[in-house]
Image (cartoon, rainbow, N blue to C red):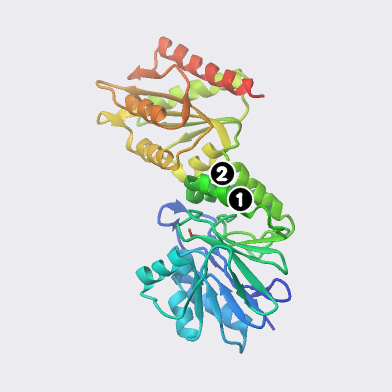
Amino acid sequence: MKLLSVKMNDFLYYVGVNDRDTHLFENIWPLENGVSYNSYLIVAEKTALLDTVKITKVSDFTTKLREAIGDRDLDYLVVHHMEPDHSGSIETIRELYPNVKIVGNKKTIEFLNEFYGITDNLVEIKDGESLDLGSRKLTFYTTPMVHWPESMVSYEEYSKTLFSQDAFGGFGALDGTIFDDEINLDFYHSETRRYYSNIVGKFSKSVQFALKKLSPLDIKMVCPVHGPIWRANPGKIIELYDKWSSYQVEEGVIICYGSMYGNTQTMAEVIARELAEQGIKNIKIFDVSKTHHSYILSEIWKYKAVILGSCTYNNDMFPVMSNLVNTLRMNKIENHLIGVFGSYSWSGGAVKSLKEFAEDGKYELIEPVVEAKCTAKEADIEELKKLAKNIADKLKADR
Ligand code: FEO
C-alpha cells in the first residue's frame, strides 16, 4: 500500500515534500506558509524521476520515492532546473541508484559539474528532443531564464502533462491538498503571485517567450516544482502567468512609506485619503519598516500605481526604503504609474534619490514630486492632494 507518495494516475506518482522549517526562501523571501518542493516519478517500461528536492528534506523525499518505485531500479533522473532547491538531493539519488542516468541539456551538464562535480552517467538532450520511456515519452523544451539559463520543461504526450519546473509554481506548503481541485484557490492565488513577483518576475520577457513556445501543446495537467498541480483547470495558472508576465494590472494604488517619527507617514495618509475622495477603491498603505518587501512587491505587481515616500536619513533614502527600491529596480517593472514624496529636516536626499529611481525605470512619473521640511505644511498638503488627484485621474481614464 502506498502511504506517503500520491498515485496521480496509472504511471505517475507525486513524491514531493513540504518545507515548513525554512524561514526564508533563497534566504530572502519569507515562507510563513511554507513551500513545497515537487518531484514526480514516472513508472513505465523505464522509470524516471523528475527533479529532486532541497537537501534538508532528502529523508522525507527518499522515503516517498522508495515507496513509490518499490523493487524497480531508477533508470533516469531528469533535471529540469539546477537551483539547489531542486538539485540538492541529486547526489543522494546517485548513491541510492548508482545506475541512474541524469538527463539535462548542455547548460544543465555544466552546472552538474560546477555544483556537484558530476561528470558521468549523463544524457545530454537538445531542445525538442525526446526521452523514450517505453509506453511513455518525454519531449523537452528549453525555457532559458525561467528561472535560470538551463531551465527547461518536458511534455508527456500520452497524458498531455507538462512538467514545468519553476514556471507556474507558487509559495505555500501543500497541506494534504496537492491538486487545484482540492485547494483553497484564494490562498494559493495570492501565494503564487508573491512567488511570481519575487522569484520569476524579473524574467517576465523570458516567461512570455516560453508561453508562446509552449502554446501549440495541448496541456491537460501542469506539474510545477512548487505549489499545486493543475489538473482540473491548467488554463487558469497559464492565464495568471501570462497576465503577470505581460504586466497586466488592476486599478489601485500601493503607497509605501519609510518614516522614523511619523511625519512621512502623515503625508502618506493625506495621499490615501485624497485618492479615496477621488473614487479609488483599491488603496493599500505599507510601512516599509514593518512589511517585508516580498509582500509589497507582490501588491505592486497587481496594481497600476505605486507611490513611494521616504524620510531623509543620512542625506539619502531611509535604508529600508532603499531596500525596496533596489528590489523594484532589479525587477524592471513596466506599465506602472509612480509618484514620489518625502521629508527632510536640514538637508534633503531622499526625494532626490526616489525621483532618480522613478525616472530611470520604465515608470510614468506623475507630478508633483512633494518634499516637506520637517512636517508637511498647508502648501505641502495641497501638493500631496494634487499628486493623488493626478494619479486618480490617470487611473480613471483607463476605466
Ligand atoms: Fe525553485 Fe529556481 O528554483
Q: Amino acid at mark 1?
A: Leu
- Image-based side of 305 in relation to 118, left or right: right
> Which residue appears farthest toward the top when viewing the image?
379
x and y percentages locating residue 222 in the rendered image: 66, 60
- Image-based side of 117 in relation to 1, left or right: left
Q: What residue is disc 1 on?
A: 211
Q: Residue at x 52, y 69 (%)?
A: 125
Q: Residue at x 53, y 17 (%)?
A: 390
Q: CA distance from mark 2 to mark 1?
A: 10 Å
Q: Residue at x 43, y 27 (%)?
A: 265
Name the secondary structure under disc 1: helix
Q: Amino acid at mark 2?
A: Ser
Graded by Cα atoms within 10 Å as few (under 14), some (14 to 19) or many (20 or more), the crowding at tag 2 reads: many
Of the numbered discs 2 and 1, the one sitting upstream in the chain is 1
Tell me if I can see residue 349 in this picture. yes
Q: What residue is disc 2 on?
A: 245
The residue lying toward the viewer, choosing from 181 and 168, is: 168
